[in-house]
Amino acid sequence: MTMTAASKTVPDPGRGPESKRDSVLTKILVRQETTLILVMLVIGAFAASRSSLFLSPDNVTEIFRSSVIYFVMACGAGLLIIGGGMDFSAGAVFTLGALSTCKLLVEGAAWPLAILAGLAVCCVIGVVNFVVVTYLHVPPIIATLGTFYMLTGIDNLVTGGADILPLPESFQRIGQGNVAGVSNDVLIAIAVGLLFWFLLERTRFGVNVRALGGNRQAAVGNGLRVVRLDVALYVIAAATAALAGIIYSARVGAGQVTAGGTSTTLNAITAVLIGGVSLMGGMGTIQGIAVGAVLLSLIDNALVLTSIPPQYNSIVIGAILVCAVAVDHLRRSRIYRKR
């Protein structure tokens, strides 16, 4: 009895405050965002040593502005991938949303109504993707690639391959204006990021999305409304792609048929995967996606300022992407091994 009582009073060294602090520190250090920030610091230090313009306020602002389009697209695409889906039509939806909005603007529609109409058109595309994947049982990659090619053809047919302009100044201020020195497009990206962070981290919807992506059969068995979740995710992914296209058009002052496309799709998905979203679903954060989008912009900017050939951009991004997916595999293996 004495030994038992004594054993109860002996503090567990593994549960002390220092151990807890160490555990928190370890979790921070192993997070994907932390690794990416370290990579950004290394690239930034290299670029700053080669060009005095790199750390200038104007250039730093340009880095964040360049990441806006990919981040806004990646929020919806990332949420969809976390939920176990995939959308390769984003680049064409990007263009469709921009062209639909710009077409209405040049015909005299008020810009808020034109934007809502452009978003609505692309939300219909999200529903189409959902129907093809869910009811026709076409794999998401094939279904959305098909949508991508069809929309690309439609975009060219509707416009005849010509850009849509001029656009009203009130609309262009969305992409070119600023508030207290902060660009409007950056403010929009921050608002979108906060909204998606709240949805994913603080709502039942976010919990269900993670559950759906983590184990679809278990989600069905637990009574989750899988069909409703799927349609919501595909619609959200299409809406964010369209919003990114609209922001881009406001920035350049025209609806460009050549905007979007394969490169835009791949860059958005790359930002998602580099940011720590698991390709297998169930895992990922909005803050990780944000860091991934900024990293892509940072690499491109650093290579330009240091006069390194643009071909190296693809090499660096490809290497980081492979490493990110490999880390995701190791992370998932470790989690399931613990279980």
Image (cartoon, rainbow, N blue to C red):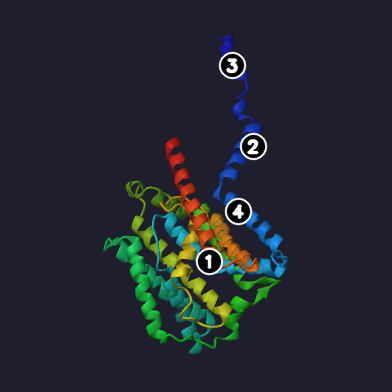
Q: Amino acid at mark 3?
A: Ser
Residue drawn at point x = 39 percent, y = 68 percent: 126
Say if mark 3 contacts mark 2, CB within 8 Å. no
Placement of the N terminus among the 4 image quadrants: top right
Q: CA distance from mark 1 to mark 4?
A: 19 Å
Which of the pair 151/285 is nearer the observer? 151
Query: CB atoms at circles 2 and 4 under 8 Å apart?
Result: no
Identify the mark nearer the N-term, 1 or 4.
4
Please tell me which of labels 2 and 1 falls first in the chain. Answer: 2
Tell us which disc is closer to us: 2 or 4.
Answer: 4
For badge 4, the amino acid type reads Val
The residue lying furthest to the top in this view is 2
For the C terminus, the quadrant is top left
Q: How far across and down, in percent of the image, does residue 221 sit?
A: 32, 46
Query: Which residue is at 60% across, 85% downward?
Result: 169
Using a 10 Å C-alpha cutoff, classify the residue at mark 2 as few (fewer than 14 neighbours), some (14 to 19) or many (20 or more).
few
Q: For the residue labelled by badge 1, is the local secondary structure a helix, a strand or a loop?
A: helix
Looking at the image, do the residues carrying marks 1 and 4 touch, with CB atoms under 8 Å apart?
no
Distance between the alpha carbons at the discs numbered 3 and 2: 25 Å
Location of mark 1 (residue)? 311
Q: As displayed, is residue 206 above or below residue 114?
A: above
Q: CA distance from mark 2 to mark 4?
A: 25 Å
Question: x%, y% of residue 309?
Answer: 57, 67
Front residue of this view, candidates 78 and 39 = 39
317 displayed left or right of 87: right
Mark 2 or mark 1: which is in front?
1
Cβ atoms at labels 3 and 4 below 8 Å apart: no
Measure how far apart labels 3 and 4 are at the Cα level: 47 Å
Q: In the rendered image, is residue 1 in sight?
A: yes
